[in-house]
Image: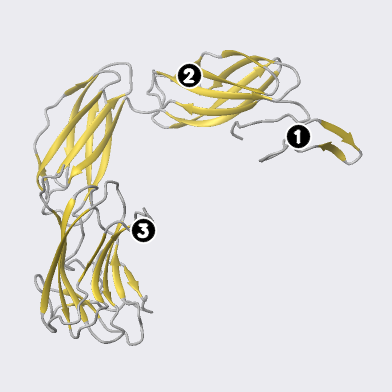
Amino acid sequence: TDVGDWTPLKTTVTPAGYAFAAPAGRMVAALLLARAEPIIHIQSITPTPPGETGVARVAVTWLGAETLHGTVGMAMPKGWTCRPAACEIYPGKTASFAIPFTVASNAAFDVHDVHAAVKAGEQTTKRCAMMGVCRPVQASLDWINHTTIQLSARNVSSKPVDADVKLILPSPAQTQAVKAPVRIEAGQTWTHVYELATAQGVLTREDVRAELAYGGITSAAHELMQPPLINGGFEQCSAHDGQPDYWGYRVPAPARPVPMLDTDQHVEGKQSLRIDPLPGIKTNYMRTSMLYLLPDTTYRLRLAVRRSANHPGIYIHLMNHHATNGKFSTVNVVLGSETTAPVNTWKHYEKVFTTTNVVTPFTLILINNSEGAATVWFDDVSIEPVETDHP
């Protein structure tokens, strides 16, 4: 158990066992020990490269009647070393220790079992934890906007690193070259911002990978690259079943897949999404959550709608999942709900909106809640960033 507030209990032996009075206030558990042992909590262990020194932070609680005299150390894999610390812990008290250790130079990049060990006389108590042997360089990729990505690489070792850097993008995207090799001093972070020349050809989720090669070691970072909305034109249908890719949530769920792509009605491309009327059904929509919208960014939502009859329950709804000030969603964009729109022809809609300053999931819903009054087609749904002066 983790270390908290411990209260030694005064017990008396009874024919049925032990009797004790529970202390006032909230109590999580009562622990009865035939022999007192230290309670060990491993607070943190520094992920450490091979051949380097890290620190394990350990707290020890002692509930015995006499002061605990002994040592606190780490039992580690073969070839690793540590320097135990002497301990003197009074009854009912907790003491914290920082235990330095050195990872073997040939240790594998992996997660290893280690143990915090308290030794007092002939008694040794251990508690197991896992720690990672990490690469000297830790890298990450972060989107700044939809055409700019930043690579950060931190050298967590005690020696400088000279690395060759490579950014691997999906084939439709291009970027400026980065000067290589780069030197990252011990304990320092190197960053580079990549401006993508084009990302228009990226139509699905694609992997972006950065590699830093040094001394026979490769550190890597991954990120996903995608347009703000995937398959808003409904042209992708890899299963050839009439169901558009990335629009996999249908309400009500049909007993069997029903083709929803219409090749007779469309604005651009070869097909549109058709939501047929369902008499007597009040909830009738198709939904996607395959969106990636950056925080604090202005976008323009565009789409085209065709309807066979008017009904206010025909519309598109973009929302995020960010509850604040009593509202479930802080971004709510609704377009298309009309009672006098032209029928049997396409009408275009658009609206500019700004996302909140935190990363949140988004959902886009195409709705035909006309209760059987109309057939509705949606096409050319797009979300694109808008250039603004706002930072």
- The Cα atoms of the two marked residues, 3 and 2, are separated by 54 Å
- The Cα atoms of the two marked residues, 1 and 2, are separated by 36 Å
Q: Earlier in the sequence, mark 3 or mark 2?
A: 2
Q: Secondary structure at mark 1?
A: loop
The x and y percentages for residue 215 are 26, 22
Left or right, 9 with respect to 317, comes to right
**Could you say which disc has been placed on residue 80 in the image?**
2
Above-or-below relation of 23 to 103 = below
* Amino acid type at mark 1: Leu
Front: mark 3 or 2: 3
The x and y percentages for residue 16 are 89, 41
The x and y percentages for residue 99 are 51, 18
**Could you say which disc has been placed on residue 32 in the image?**
1
Q: Is residue 242 visible?
A: no
* Quarter containing the N terminus: top right
Circle 3 Cα neighbour tier, 10 Å, few/some/many (<14 / 14–19 / ≥20): few
Which quadrant would residue 344 be assigned to in this image?
Answer: bottom left
* Amino acid type at mark 3: Lys
User: Which residue is label 3 attached to?
Assistant: 327
Q: Which residue is located at x 62 percent, y 20 percent?
A: 118
- The Cα atoms of the two marked residues, 1 and 3, are separated by 49 Å
* Quarter containing the C terminus: top left
Q: Is residue 113 visible?
A: yes
Q: Secondary structure at mark 3?
A: loop
**Could you say which disc has been placed on residue 312 in the image?**
none
Q: Which residue is located at x 80 percent, y 30 percent?
A: 10
Above-or-below relation of 387 to 246 = above
Q: Nearer the viewer, residue 291 or 260?
A: 291
Which quadrant would residue 135 be assigned to in this image?
Answer: top left
Circle 2 Cα neighbour tier, 10 Å, few/some/many (<14 / 14–19 / ≥20): some
Q: Secondary structure at mark 2?
A: loop
